[in-house]
Image (spheres, rainbow, N blue to C red):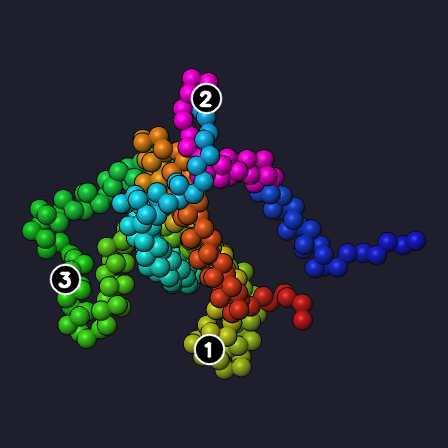
Amino acid sequence: MRRKSLTIAQKKGIAGFIFLLPVILGLIFLFILPLIDSLRFSFSLLTITDDGFDLTFIGWDNFNNALRVNPDFNRHLVEAMLDLLIDVPIIIILSFLFASILNQQFRGRALARAVFFLPVILASGAIAIIDGADFAQNVMRQTMDEAGGTGGLQAFQLESLLLGAGLDSTIVGYLTGAVDRIYLIVTSMGVQLLVFLAGLQSIPVSLYEASKVEGATSYETFWLITFPLLTPLILTNVVYTVVNSFLTNDLSDFVREMAFRNFNFGLSAAMSWIYFLCIAVILFLLVRFISRYVYYQDAEK
């Protein structure tokens, strides 16, 4: 009996599963057990002993301590959520804009791409240690002080300027918050820029040629061809940016200090789970919302 050949969609599904298999195996063998242990720690009082550690079940006390007793956790959590709301849209918009610019034909394009991809290099290795110590920010602050505070447009000056122009205080607060965090934002968008650039280069040139023959303007070409075909990558970059923010903020440092400096592993685990659940809820809402507008060119009708 002749075997039925696989469809293109089935072959793509198998290829996708093989591509994800290392990640799935890593999650099963390297992530699940620590996840279960952290959940146990969050409901227990962990005491270090000569033989290792002892766990004493205390129920929801660690969660109550994190949310209602500890004076700093709620403040760090709110700040992390607000920074997330500020950073994610700006990172996505700027990386999309820079990728569109770098996709154009101009002299020195390779050098320009290397310069824009420097944030990925800056976020790795020994340079990350300097960055973590706020070295660059301290140098910039020292330069501003030596210049008498006139080295650039400071956040409070921008706030006064925008409020004087009649903008709403909420919008002004959003923009000034982004200005205060511009260094972190720029160093966090290298991967997103690369993903968008790869997506732009994967769009068939024939689509642009056909639209030009039909008399479409650049505006129409962008909104009817470029943007729809990049919506899957927008969703991917949003998820990546939200998850990446999980590791690079003051709240993560605070949770690590609670575990490895104060040796309160149970409370640290409870704080981690609260933060994880907040991020999971935000990701769920973002994915549900953005998925409504994602266009998949090869999707079956």
Write the start and end of the magenta stretch as one range.
Answer: 25-52
Q: Is 32 inside the magenta-drawn segment?
A: yes
Q: In front of the other: label 2 or label 1?
A: 2
Q: Examine the rendered structure and indicate whether residue 163 appears above or below residue 249.
A: below
Q: Callout 1, which amino acid?
A: Glu
Q: Residue furthest bottom?
A: 215
Q: Position of residue 182 (x, y in %)?
A: 27, 54
Residue 37, how many percent across, how many down? 50, 35
Picture coordinates of residue 177, whole percent (x, y)? 25, 58
Does 93 appear above or below 110? below
Q: Which residue is mark 1?
A: 220
Please report whichever mark, 2 or 1, sits nearer to the chain's N-terminal start.
2
Return the x and y of residue 132 as percentages of the image width and height.
30, 39
Q: Pointer 3: what residue?
A: 157
Q: Is residue 14 visible?
A: yes
Residue 91 appears in the picture as rendered:
no
- What is the spatial separation of the Cα atoms under label 2 and label 1, in whole angstroms? 65 Å
Which residue lies at the image location 45% right of the left edge and 24% below the top edge? 53
State the residue position of label 2.
52
Query: In which quarter of the view is residue 127 placed?
Result: top left
Quarter assignment of residue 136? top left
In the displayed structure, does residue 289 sit left or right of residue 70?
Answer: right
Q: Amino acid at mark 3?
A: Gln
Q: Nearer the viewer, residue 298 or 27?
A: 27
Indicate the secondary structure of the residue bearing disc 1: helix
Q: Is residue 6 left or right of residue 282?
A: right
